[in-house]
Amino acid sequence: MLTELPEKPVSPIFISPKNINSVIEIGRSEAYELLKNDPTFPKLRRISGRRVAWLVEDLAAWAKTRPVHEVGPSRVQTKKVKGGA
């Protein structure tokens, strides 16, 4: 019998295609495109008769393989004020 709550909440093990954007910043249609065209993207797993979902740890592992984006100088330029100090 459980008498105390766990110290930290249990995170989800599976995530549905509908909610994939809560794990990684892509939408459902983009996820399906990745499934179709990127052999490294995690495959869906059948969790019941008609339900499929991703294993969250598979998505996290895939996300860690994404290349790091090198950010260059900002394109935002400040306007110079005439007669300013």
Image (tube, rainbow, N blue to C red):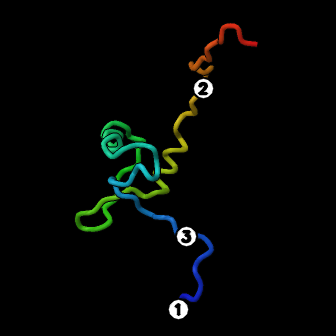
Q: Earlier in the sequence, mark 1 or mark 3?
A: 1
> Extreme left residue here?
50
Q: Residue at x 33, y 43 (%)?
A: 35
Q: Point out which mark residue 1 bears.
A: 1
- What count of labels does the image hold? 3
Q: Secondary structure at mark 1?
A: loop
Task: Tell me the CA gap for discs 2 and 1.
Answer: 52 Å
Q: Residue at x 30, y 42 (%)?
A: 29
> Extreme bottom residue here?
1
Q: Earlier in the sequence, mark 2 or mark 1?
A: 1
Mark 3 sits on what residue? 9
Task: Tell me the CA gap for discs 2 and 3.
Answer: 35 Å
Question: In the image, residue 46 lies at what x, y percent?
Answer: 31, 62
Q: Amino acid at mark 3?
A: Pro
- The one nearer the camera, 20 or 37, is 20
Mark 2 sits on what residue? 71
- Viewed as shown, does residue 70 lie left or right of 38? right
Q: Secondary structure at mark 3?
A: loop
Task: Tell me the CA gap for discs 1 and 3.
Answer: 18 Å
Q: Residues within 10 Å of mark 2 (few under 14, many from 20)?
A: few
Q: Amino acid at mark 1?
A: Met
Q: Secondary structure at mark 2?
A: loop
Question: In the image, residue 19 lies at what x, y percent?
Answer: 37, 54
- Viewed as shown, does residue 85 lie left or right of 54? right
